[in-house]
Amino acid sequence: MYFLGLTFGVASGTYPFLLFLVLVLPLLAAILYALLGLWLASPLVWVFALVSFGSWIGTQTGYDSGTYFLGMNFPLRLAILGAVFTAVGLVGQSPYFGASRAGSSSLKERLFFLSPQTKVMGLLYLFISLWILSIFGNYGEMDEVDQFRSMQILPWGLLFGAAALAAIWYGLKRDDGVLRGFGLTFLLINLYTRFFEYFWAPLPKALFFAVLAISFWYLGSRAETIWQLGRRRKETKNG
């Protein structure tokens, strides 16, 4: 977009054309990909639709309101979008809505068939955004970030951890390996982010890396135990 601006916008003054590319094309792409994904029952095309829609949400709200939209910065907006996608994906995979055949002519069943991809994209949006929020909080400018204290963003870290634990719990309950995997991965990311944030400066570096190595071993073994617990439940259920 920068080079398009130099070529079309700055040189000729055609800023409406550049705004069309930035604000309208992502929405048109999302609609086109969504229609093709539903028509072809294609998970890959459906993922492109969700990515394009997320890009449009970010550019549109940023253009309308700048850094903040309804008091929310970009990561918080995308976290809410990710929560919506995740909820829709989980509902679509619920046994109450069950039917999910790729070759079905029903629009409803094709939406249910694409629910796993909706869930995965929602989890990506949600957890990556929560991770960023746990580091920078609901701030929009770097000069604001430099002024806050760690305790002011602690609630975001707690929310991030609670979301990861909820994903692990629900993944174990529903025997959902995707939820368990996301929950375990981002719980570890949260713990190590907090470790670096609070102990990098005060601890001697030798002690810091020793604790880091021991924690890698211990948390890795616990994560494997939780993962195997989910597999054992599945084997018991199938047996």
Image: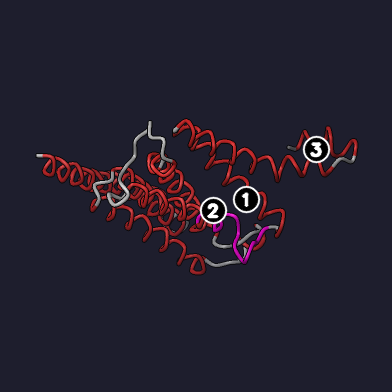
Look at label 3 and name its amino acid: Gly
Look at label 1 and name its amino acid: Gly
Q: Which residue is mark 2?
A: 78
What is the number of the mark on residue 58? 1
Q: Residues within 10 Å of mark 2 (few under 14, many from 20)?
A: many
Spatial separation of the CA atoms under disc 3 and disc 2: 26 Å
The answer to whether residue 154 shows anywhere in this view is yes
Q: Of helix, strand and loop, which one carries label 1? A: helix
- Look at 32% across and 49% down and name the residue there: 97
Residue, far front = 105
- Look at 30% across and 47% down and name the residue there: 180
Q: Is residue 76 magenta?
A: yes
Look at label 2 and name its amino acid: Leu
Say whether disc 2 or disc 1 marks the residue closer to the N-terminus.
1
Spatial separation of the CA atoms under disc 1 and disc 3: 19 Å
Query: Do the CB atoms of the residues marked 2 and 1 lie less than 8 Å apart?
Result: yes
What is the number of the mark on residue 154? none
Q: Of helix, strand and loop, which one carries label 3? A: helix
Residue, far right = 12
Say whether disc 1 or disc 3 marks the residue closer to the N-terminus.
3
Image x and y of residue 84, in percent? 47, 55
The residue range painted magenta reads 67-79
Spatial separation of the CA atoms under disc 2 and disc 1: 8 Å
Q: Of helix, strand and loop, which one carries label 2? A: helix
Q: Which residue is mark 3?
A: 5
Viewer-closest of 165 and 196: 165
Image x and y of residue 189, in percent? 40, 49
